[in-house]
Amino acid sequence: MDVVKRSVDNSLCFGVFNKDDKQVGFARIVTDYAVLAWVMDVFITEEYRGQGLSKLLMKEITEHPDLQGLKRWGLMTADAHSLYQQFGFTPASKPEMLMEKLL
């Protein structure tokens, strides 16, 4: 099984589609549905940016019934801090506790 299929199959996925049913955005959430959700792979295609679609996408994600009551949400972003701040995300309160293993 390829890595893309496996990652999508094991995530809660969200799509954004235009009026012609062409996909123009995507996000996936890795979660245990009890404690943690990790927001990943968020994108809106270039021609559809600046139309509020990323805000709509994040609103749908954060209000999804299966994701209510979680204790922690996480994500990594290089350049969209202001978008995520609108949905309550802040820099890690204890970054010294975060660890990673890159392969």
Image: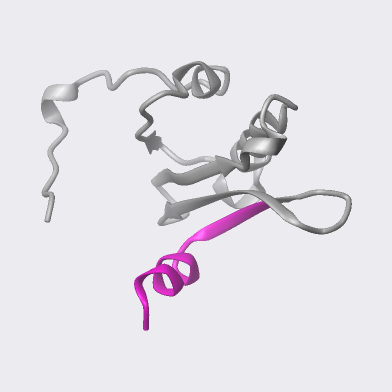
Q: Is residue 49 above or below residue 7?
A: above
Q: Return the residue found at the far right.
A: 19
Q: Residue at x 55, y 42 (%)?
A: 43
- Asked if residue 43 lies in the magenta stretch, the reply is no
Tell me which residue sits at (43%, 46%) in the image. 40
Quarter residue 21 falls in = bottom right
User: Magenta segment range?
Assistant: 1-15
Q: Nearer the viewer, residue 47 or 60?
A: 47
Q: Is residue 68 visible?
A: no
- 11 within the magenta span: yes
Above or below: residue 93 compared with residue 8: above
Q: Is residue 52 visible?
A: yes
Q: Is residue 53 left or right of residue 91?
A: right
The answer to whether residue 20 is left or right of residue 29 is right
State left or right for residue 43 relative to residue 102. Answer: right
Query: What is the x, y in percent for residue 38?
Result: 40, 44
Residue reaching furthest to the bottom = 1
Locate residue 14, reporting x and y percent. Answer: 62, 53
Q: Nearer the viewer, residue 39 or 51?
A: 51
Residue 9, horizontal then vertical, whole percent: 48, 71
Dividing the picture into quadrants, the one containing residue 46 is top right
Query: What is the quadrant of the C terminus in the image?
Result: bottom left
On-image quarter of the N terminus: bottom left
Residue that protrudes farthest toward the front in the picture: 47
In the image, what residue occupies the spot 68% across and 40% down? 60
Q: Is residue 75 left or right of residue 49?
A: left
Colour mode of the rendering:
one colour
Residue 22 at x, y percent in the picture: 76, 57
- Residue drawn at (66%, 48%), measured in percent from left and top? 65
Quadrant hosting residue 45? top right
